[in-house]
Amino acid sequence: MKIIFNESRQIYISMINKVQDYIEIHLYEELTVELLANIASFSSFHFQRIYRQITGESLYSYIKRLRLEKAAFLLAANSNKTIQNIALSLGYSNQSSFAKAFKNKFGINASNFRTLSEKDRMIIINNNINLNDNSTNGEVYNKEINYTRPMELSVQIIKPTKVVYIRHTGPYKGDGKLFDQLFTKLYSYTSSLNIIKKDSKWLVIYHDFGDLTMEEQLRLSVCMSIDTDIRTKGEFGSMILEGGKYAVGKFSLKPDEYQLAWNYMLSKWLPESGYVPDDRLFFEYFPPEENINEKEEKIVEIFIPIIPL
């Protein structure tokens, strides 16, 4: 089994390396998530998350860093090339946006950087990398990631599920009160419609990526399964959660341990599993029979949509 796991991780690494090779050659071009995901043969919906989990650096940060590091080299090595030409050759739409990015990165204007001695330029670059940059220079992320192991792991095939939901947009990490409020609101609403059943399932669906999307734009939906169509109104809506094959990790978690569980599924299990995620949504399921008692810990099952590598 370990051999299979190692081979699977190597496939992930190979795909990421292929993308990085393409980026380095095409820095001057528009580099979209869809294009790079296609090169990696990953779902465009989950590609950025996979890239971050494997390399420890967001895709956007990697492209931006390479462009600015290349700019620093060109400024020093080619005095005949104007700053505007350098900016345009690296994919910046104008000199103004490049100038702002360069100063934010290195703490000095591009024109002033060009006049420095080679020794002073290297000091600025090295200080920036050592103090302000958490990047991995294009290498596979080797820093140990904290995670918690599941009680059980399985691969399941589920049917499409109708759900009624209440959606939240904005920060949510570590905010237990927010989740309690959302579940309470949804319970009150579905109770008023008399549609709660013994086998109703309670879920949280995540529409965005917590480490890639601005907190103010993060979206999640607290849901309850239903077996009939209903008319919703106001802050409540309905949708269908797609069926298919999912990897399922079952955890017993304290309020501050959810990220550790996701770290395990995405950073440990997924790259070693022989699967990749597709365009369906990730979600959490809370088995009711196992969460009857009011405990600090809750049983939660994390569902990741998968297809073979």
Image: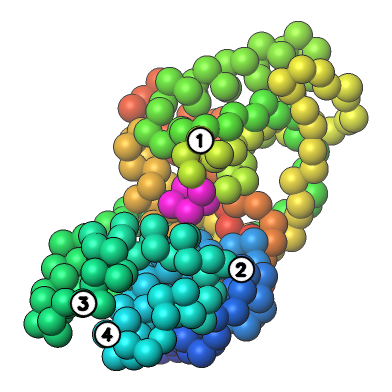
From the image, tell me which residue sits under label 4.
76
Dot 4 and dot 3 residues touching (CB under 8 Å): no
Q: Which quarter of the rendered picture does the N terminus lie within?
A: bottom left
The reply to whether the magenta stretch includes residue 211 is yes
Residue 96, horizontal then vertical, whole percent: 46, 60
Task: Identify the residue at horizontal 16%, vertical 70% (top origin).
Answer: 124
- Residue position marked by numbered label 2 in the rendering: 33
Whole-number angstrom distance, CA of label 1 to CA of label 4: 39 Å
Residue 205 percent across, percent down from the top left: 61, 42
Discs 4/3, front: 3
Magenta region: which residues? Answer: 209-213
**Residue at image point 43% right, 20% down:** 177
Callout 4 secondary element = helix
Residue 201 at x, y percent in the picture: 66, 34
Residue 80 seen by the camera: yes
- Cα–Cα gap, marks 4 and 2: 31 Å
> Which amino acid, by three-letter code, is at mark 4?
Ala
Q: Label 1 vs label 2: CA separation?
A: 21 Å
Q: Return the disc, 4 or 3, that comes first in the chain's sequence.
A: 4
Q: Amino acid at mark 3?
A: Thr
Give the residue drawn at x 37%, y 81%.
70
- Using the numbered discs, state the Cα–Cα distance from disc 3 to disc 2 in whole angstroms: 36 Å
Whichever of callouts 1 and 2 sits on the residue coming sooner in the sequence is 2
Circle 3 sits on which residue?
A: 115
Q: Which residue is mark 1?
A: 216
Q: Is residue 235 magenta?
A: no
Q: Quadrant of residue 206?
A: top right
Q: Tell me which residue sits at (51%, 35%) in the image.
A: 216
Q: Secondary structure at mark 3?
A: helix
Task: Decide: few, some or many residues near mark 4? Use Cα within 10 Å; few <14, some 14-19, many ≥20.
Answer: some
